[in-house]
Image (cartoon, grey):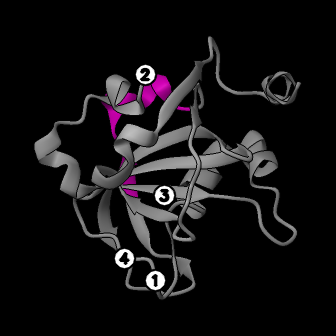
Amino acid sequence: MICLNDLLRIEQDDFDSVKVRFVISHDEIDILKEYLKDSDYVNNKYFMWRNENTNFKIGQIIVCILRIEKDIWLLTSVRKITKDLNTINDIGYESEEVEEYKKFFGRVIIKYHNTSQNMIRKYENIHNELEVNQILKNIFSNNDFLSIRE
């Protein structure tokens, strides 16, 4: 099995400063459609959204993964928190993409069964479960979605 960290190569000593944020569709929002329309909007709004239970710290690395379908996820970004906006139920953080991982954004399909209701997980606890299912030649598109579902 090839794990996501085989690609990202995050040092074990740094695991405690890395979190994985999973985003799924909800209510009337189809997160995959939103991502296909405007990936920057999704990466800056949905992954940086803050509610009472979201607590990132300046300097933390956030691995941003959105659900394509059950147990199949797409790596959309890896971001470093640069500012806490001190808001609740709104975009709560400013962040910047970690350049060294940019080549993987929108191209790495991950297989992972989230056994927790928590959509923010410590990387150190799940890094061995984030299986690379596929690396796309190009950035994810509607055609890829159709082929994955078949």
Residue topped by disc 3:
21
Rendered position, 13 above or below 119? above
Disc on res. 2:
2
Q: Earlier in the sequence, mark 1 or mark 2?
A: 2
Crowd band around label 4 with a 10 angstrom C-alpha radius: few (<14), some (14–19), many (20+): few
Query: Gap in Å between the C-alphas at discs 3 and 1?
Result: 12 Å
Mark 2 or 3, closer to the camera: 2
Disc on res. 104:
none
Marks 4 and 1: in contact by CB < 8 Å?
yes
Q: Earlier in the sequence, mark 3 or mark 1?
A: 3
SS at badge 1: loop
Residue topped by disc 1:
53
**Amino acid at circle 1:** Asn
Q: How many marks?
A: 4
Instruction: Return the x and y of residue 11 as percentages of the image width and height.
Output: 16, 36
Mark 2 or 4, closer to the camera: 2
Residue topped by disc 4:
55
Instruction: Return the x and y of residue 98 as percentages of the image width and height.
Output: 33, 39
**Amino acid at circle 4:** Asn
Query: Gap in Å between the C-alphas at discs 1 and 2?
Result: 31 Å
Marks 1 and 3: in contact by CB < 8 Å?
no
